[in-house]
Amino acid sequence: MPTATLDKTDIKMLAALQANGRLTNVELAEKVALSPSPCLRRLKQLEDSGVIRQYVALLDPAKIGLGLQAFVRVTLEKRGSTHLQGFMDAVQRWPEVVNCYAMTGEMDYLLQVYFEDLEHFSRFVMDDLLQQPGVEDVKSSFVLKEFKQTTSLPISHLNL
């Protein structure tokens, strides 16, 4: 996949927006030493090229009643890929799953999931995940404490 060509100003804009996606165009322009009009043009180019995918509000899971976070390792049956699409479709429907990764190694998929409590987790595993055709094995790990959580991607390698 080709990498977008970014100059120092673009990189400064990306760093500023990763720190605070609610910056106004005027505030962003000040941070990167541009006037508002060229800043807005550059921002639009970053959005149109897909470098900036979207803007979101990040919620605190505990403050909205999702006090249990887990990582669930899923292995699917290896006999053909008949269950693969069904599993991928189900993952899209399950609101508890915030991230899903196809993996190398001992598992096929790694799910990051949030729950209200252990009972909610149990219902999800028993009623949804294990009922999904093709699911052969499920192993879970609960998060005890979060030491680092960020949505900011490392961009220091982009510096010219």
Image (tube, rainbow, N blue to C red):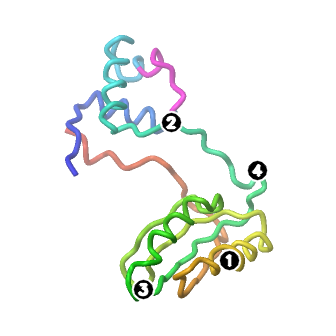
- Callout 3 amino acid: Glu
Crowding near the residue tagged with mark 4, few <14, some 14–19, many ≥20 C-alpha atoms within 10 Å: few
Front disc: 4 or 1: 1
Cα distance between the residues tagged 4 and 3:
34 Å
In the rendered image, the residue lying farthest to the front is 82
Residue 27 among magenta residues: yes
Residue extent of the magenta highlight? 21-28
Q: Where is residue 16 shown, x and y percent of the image?
A: 43, 32
Q: Is residue 59 above or below residue 42?
A: below
Task: Compute the Cα span from label 3 to label 2.
Answer: 34 Å
The residue depicted at 30 percent of the width and 30 percent of the height is 10
Q: Earlier in the sequence, mark 4 or mark 3?
A: 4
Q: Quadrant of residue 105?
A: bottom left
User: Which sits in the foreground, 21 or 113?
Assistant: 113
Residue 41 image point, x, y percent: 32, 18
Mark 1 sits on what residue? 125
Q: Is residue 1 left or right of residue 67?
A: left
Residue holding disc 3: 106
- Quarter of the C terminus within the rendering: top left
Is residue 79 depicted above or below 148 in this figure?
below
Q: Is residue 10 above or below residue 127?
A: above
User: Residue placed at 63% from the left, 70% from the top?
Assistant: 70
Mark 3 touches mark 2? (CB < 8 Å): no
